[in-house]
Image (cartoon, rainbow, N blue to C red):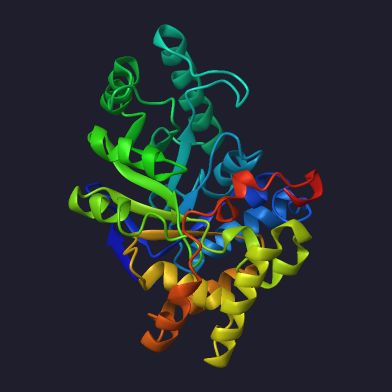
């Protein structure tokens, strides 16, 4: 596994990090339940043994933070990097908090994450950003002030953001310090940010964290489990699969190698699984390097930039598919 420094932080990260939502709560096609806690902890330690030293979590990921704390809370200097998240609203159905209420909410969230993760300091905390987070290009003063205080106190080492679209991502870049990393969705079929946002991240030394590498399973063997209303998306994924197989490469492997070594030039990509085999396959794929140029060229026309179909938040699937 190759490693690099994440943006202007001092965090040395591998090319692949483990997203942990799937071990914390029912998630993905058919909402499968996570394995028992002992199996989740075993998987987390297995990932670390394989060289994955970056784990992505959030307070909203069920028992994810708690399981990470149980797995790594008492291993001292061997502890991996754990990146968690904080929201500016108490729930998705309520508006963003402001002023003293926002400060109280952020501090409570940070303290609870510290407790669950069994650590005195959080390596990276990513703020959920949407169209209401920023005003006139700058974050609310109370947010920035509190972020600075939490760094000074030692509770948080670095701050980043996670966003869902070009407009929101751009607002993070324009804000600058203290945001040192940006987590965005990017994959073979959704390259919307490739020519606009990602180059600006590199120009501003903002670490790039890529999620949705497999488009929630569409770019894998799970594609046929999704309903017919996503048929256009599935058909495009099948085309990609056929092209990849003509080159002797499985679609998930191609999707992962594209995300790591392709035009995004990401610092790290996130994969989510509770299968040791899938994790091992992903690590092996990273070791194979970039895709053949002929394959990349054949896959280029399949991008669906601008289509709502590449945005899982717009799928509005029945519960059994969320």
Residue 41 in the image: above or below residue 172: below
Could you tell me which residue is drawn at 70 percent across and 44 percent down? 316
Q: Residue furthest top?
A: 100
Q: Is residue 124 visible?
A: no
Quadrant of residue 314 within the rendered picture: top right
Q: Is residue 137 visible?
A: yes
Residue 302 in the image: above or below residue 305: below
Could you tell me which residue is drawn at 56 percent across and 92 percent down? 246
Task: Give 106 or 306, whichever is nearer the viewer.
Answer: 306
Residue 117, how many percent across, how many down?
52, 38
Q: How many marks?
A: 0
Residue 284, how many percent across, how many down?
50, 79
Residue 54 in the image: above or below residue 236: above
Residue 91, how many percent across, how many down?
60, 24
Residue 263, how many percent across, how many down?
33, 68
The N terminus is located in which quarter?
A: bottom left
Could you tell me which residue is drawn at 44 percent across and 60 percent down? 269
Answer with left or right where residue 15 lies relative to residue 72: left
Q: Residue furthest left?
A: 203
Answer with left or right where residue 184 lies relative to residue 151: right
Residue 78 in the image: above or below residue 96: below
Could you tell me which residue is drawn at 65 percent across and 40 percent down? 63
């Amino acid at each position: 596994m190759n490693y690099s420094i994440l943006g202007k932080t001092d965090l040395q990260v591998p090319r692949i990090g483990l997203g942990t939502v799937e071990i914390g709560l029912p998630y993905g096609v058919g909402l499968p339940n996570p394995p028992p806690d002992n199996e989740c902890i075993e998987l987390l330690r297995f990932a670390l043994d394989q060289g994955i030293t970056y784990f992505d979590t959030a307070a909203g990921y069920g028992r994810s933070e708690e399981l990470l704390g149980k797995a790594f809370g008492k291993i001292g200097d061997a502890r991996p990097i754990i990146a968690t998240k904080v929201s500016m609203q108490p729930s998705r159905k309520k508006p963003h908090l402001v002023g003293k209420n926002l400060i109280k909410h952020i501090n409570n969230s940070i303290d609870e994450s510290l407790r669950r993760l069994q650590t005195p300091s959080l390596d990276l905390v990513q703020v959920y950003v949407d169209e209401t987070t920023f005003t006139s290009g700058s974050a609310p003063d109370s947010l920035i002030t509190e972020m600075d205080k939490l760094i000074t106190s030692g509770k948080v080492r670095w701050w980043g953001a996670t966003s869902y679209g070009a407009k929101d991502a751009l607002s993070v870049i324009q804000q600058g310090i203290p945001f040192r990393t940006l987590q965005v969705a990017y994959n073979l079929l959704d390259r919307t940010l490739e020519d606009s946002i990602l180059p600006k991240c590199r120009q501003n030394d903002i670490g790039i964290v890529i999620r949705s590498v497999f488009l929630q399973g569409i770019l894998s063997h799970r594609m046929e489990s999704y309903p017919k209303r996503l048929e256009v998306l599935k058909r495009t994924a099948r085309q990609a699969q056929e092209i990849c197989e003509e080159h002797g490469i499985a679609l998930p492997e191609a999707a992962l190698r594209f995300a790591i070594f392709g035009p995004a030039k990401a610092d790290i990509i996130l994969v989510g699984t509770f299968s040791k085999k899938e994790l091992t396959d992903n690590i092996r794929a990273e070791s194979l390097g970039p895709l053949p140029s002929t394959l990349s060229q054949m896959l280029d026309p399949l991008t669906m930039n601008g289509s709502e179909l590449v945005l899982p938040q717009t799928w509005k699937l029945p519960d059994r598919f969320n």
